[in-house]
Image (tube, rainbow, N blue to C red):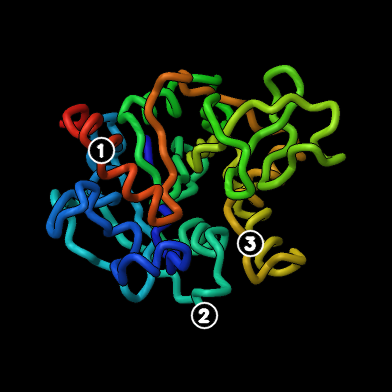
């Protein structure tokens, strides 16, 4: 079985100056009532035979109607008291510990950010390449800024990822693979360890007040459980953090992609 977890409980501080609409619910065409990020993810995941989709929301986004609702979509509430200090790893923890048993040791599970737009074919690449183990989906085309999570490694083995690593001892003697897309495939054989790592981060990590799901992937890299899966350099992908990025997506990328998802 294929499953997906969409992390959509962030408060979107960096884009809040533009709108009070939660970022996962922003219309991709810039018009009220238009297709949202969440609508796009659900359509793209269904196109690639994902049978169960879990959306982790907050008090503002939980149970928001989707353009194409269905029994395959289920909401999970991030009940953190202060979402401003709750990172995406916290949302992942709520999903991983859901009574439904999302990490069941049998299913391939995609863990993904809500604020990204991509060619739907990227989902097929995430599931279909790099063997059966856990993998991080990487885009070879990137801008090295303080906001990009870049992946570094040896040969094709990812070793480290994070923001601002370029030119530091942490990336010395490592090759930059590209930008992490925020889409990670969680292999069934790693599910138990992933749950244990996430629980450790929530309790003991020095960054536990703002732990992100990249912290979970980094621990898997430390255990040499992660392979790199690359999107073609020409394939469209974009993360939206700031108003100018949203404007560019509305003007250029969404019109180009809108006909590629049924």
Image point (58%, 49%), residue name: 147
Q: Which of 73 and 117 is in front in this view?
A: 117
Location of mark 3 (residue): 211
Q: Nearer the viewer, residue 143 or 26?
A: 143
Labels 2, 1: front one = 1
Q: Distance between the residues labelled 2 and 1?
A: 33 Å
Q: How far apart are marks 3 and 2 (CA)?
A: 13 Å
Kindly indicate whether the residue at mark 1 contacts the one at mark 2 (C-beta within 8 angstroms).
no
Location of mark 1 (residue): 254
**Element under label 1?**
helix
Q: In which quarter of the image is residue 121?
A: top left
| Left or right position of 191 against 164 | left
Q: In which quarter of the image is residue 75?
A: bottom left
Task: From the top left corner, tell me how far across and down residue 67 is, in percent.
Answer: 14, 52
**Element under label 2?**
loop
Quarter containing the N terminus: top left
Image point (32%, 42%), residue name: 249
In the image, is residue 227 above or below residue 204? above
| Mark sitting earlier along the chain (2/1) | 2
Task: From the top left corner, tell me how far across and down residue 100 is, in percent.
Answer: 39, 57
Question: Which label sits on residue 27?
Answer: none
Q: Nearer the viewer, residue 232 or 188?
A: 232
Location of mark 2 (residue): 82
| Left or right position of 175 against 246 | right
Q: Distance between the residues labelled 1 and 3?
A: 30 Å
Q: Quadrant of residue 32?
A: bottom left
Task: From the top left corner, tell me how far across and down residue 81 is, in percent.
Answer: 50, 82
Any part of residue 91 in sight = yes
**Element under label 3?**
loop
In the image, is residue 112 above or below residue 66? above
Kindly indicate whether the residue at mark 3 contacts the one at mark 1 (C-beta within 8 angstroms).
no
Q: Residue furthest bottom?
A: 81
């Amino acid at each position: 079985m294929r499953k997906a977890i969409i992390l959509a409980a962030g408060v979107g501080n960096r884009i809040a100056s533009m709108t009070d609409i939660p970022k996962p619910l922003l219309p991709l065409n810039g018009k009220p009532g238009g297709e949202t990020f969440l609508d796009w993810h659900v359509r793209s995941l269904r196109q690639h035979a994902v049978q169960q989709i879990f959306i982790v929301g907050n008090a503002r986004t939980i149970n928001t109607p989707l353009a194409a609702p269905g029994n395959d979509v289920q909401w999970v509430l991030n009940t953190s008291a202060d979402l401003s200090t709750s990172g995406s790893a916290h949302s992942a923890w709520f999903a991983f510990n859901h009574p439904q048993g999302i990490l069941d040791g049998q299913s391939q599970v995609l863990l993904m950010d809500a604020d990204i737009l991509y060619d739907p074919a990227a989902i097929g690449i995430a599931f279909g390449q790099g063997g059966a183990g856990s993998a991080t989906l990487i885009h070879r085309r990137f801008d090295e800024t303080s906001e990009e999570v870049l992946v570094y490694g040896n040969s094709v083995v990812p070793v480290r990822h994070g923001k601002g690593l370029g030119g530091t001892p942490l990336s010395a003697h490592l090759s930059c693979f590209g930008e992490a897309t925020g889409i990670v495939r969680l292999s069934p054989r790693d599910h138990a360890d992933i749950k244990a790592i996430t629980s450790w981060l929530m309790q003991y990590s020095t960054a536990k007040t703002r732990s992100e799901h990249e912290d979970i992937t980094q621990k898997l890299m430390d255990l040499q459980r992660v392979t790199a899966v690359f999107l073609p350099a020409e394939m469209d992908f974009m993360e939206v953090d700031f108003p100018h990025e949203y404007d560019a997506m509305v003007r250029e990328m969404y019109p180009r992609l809108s006909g590629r998802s049924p």
